[in-house]
Amino acid sequence: MRAFGTVVAALLAFALCPAPAGAAAPAPATPPEMVATYDSLANAILGIKASEENLVRAIVATAYGHAQAQLANAKAAIKAGDMKTARTAVENLAAAVGQLGTEGDAAVAAVRKRLVEGGHHHHHHADGEAKGEYDTGYVVVTRAAKKAFLEASRAIGQTAGAPKAETLEAEWKKVQSTYASLMKKNG
């Protein structure tokens, strides 16, 4: 990216050099080739932003899929009377729901932190961040959705000692509702 910036700077310097003395100078204008290059760069930058949003949406959707699978595992284990397996599935379900609220696990959070520190997210949701709708660096999950997912994650996790299908189903409905609203809003 640094080499590209150097090329752009050199082109700008050449294009903005004054005409030789005595030559009839046209009105100052940016050469169309430079405008076209800048326009294609803008398209690439905006495309990257859209690609990032699509990737984060996929991360959230994957966490949702993992949560659905863990809910099914927990319910099956409860029905079979296998409380050890049910407990593990409930713990995994709570973790997956937590990842919904944080747009992924710790590895994703490290990438988000790096992007924020590098200035990438400065304008991604600057308006939403200023209004308190998004946490810094978050792309898809709003503060309200994050809070709902994390509360559900805690409530689910608290049932791990004595999991009950009805309790899990009640909490899962909250997760489903928040997820559907979030994906509809951002879709």
Image (cartoon, grey):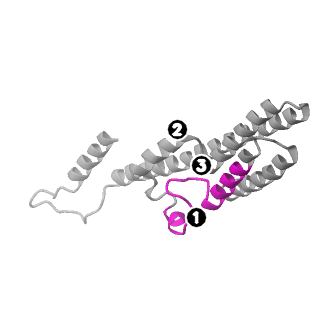
Q: In which quarter of the image is the C terminus?
A: bottom right
Q: Which of 116 and 152 is in front in this view?
A: 152
Assess whether mark 2 and mark 1 are in contact (beta carbons under 8 angstroms).
no
Residue 186 drawn above or below residue 130: above
Q: Which of 118 and 154 is in front in this view?
A: 154
Q: Quick one: label 1, few (<14), some, or many (20+) residues within 10 Å?
A: some
Where does the image place residue 49, in percent across and percent down from the top left? Answer: 51, 50
Residue beneath disc 2: 107
Query: Is residue 30 highlighted in magenta?
Result: no
Q: Quick one: label 2, few (<14), some, or many (20+) residues within 10 Å?
A: few
Q: Which of 80 and 54 is in front in this view?
A: 80
Boundaries of the magenta span: 126-155
Q: Quadrant of the N terminus?
A: top left
Where does the image place residue 183, in percent across and percent down from the top left? Answer: 70, 53
Residue beneath disc 1: 133
Residue 162 drawn above or below residue 21: above
The main secondary structure of the magenta stretch is helix
Query: Is residue 135 highlighted in magenta?
Result: yes
Give me the residue at 46% from left, 54% from top: 121
The three-letter code of the residue at mark 2 reads Ala
Marks 1, 3: nearer the viewer? 3
Which quarter of the figure has residue 62?
top right
The three-letter code of the residue at mark 3 reads Thr
The three-letter code of the residue at mark 1 reads Glu
Question: In the drawing, does residue 163 fall left or right of residue 141?
Answer: right
Marks 2 and 3 sit apart, C-alpha to C-alpha, by: 11 Å
The local secondary structure at tag 2 comes to: helix
Label ID, residue 102:
3
Marks 1 and 2 sit apart, C-alpha to C-alpha, by: 23 Å
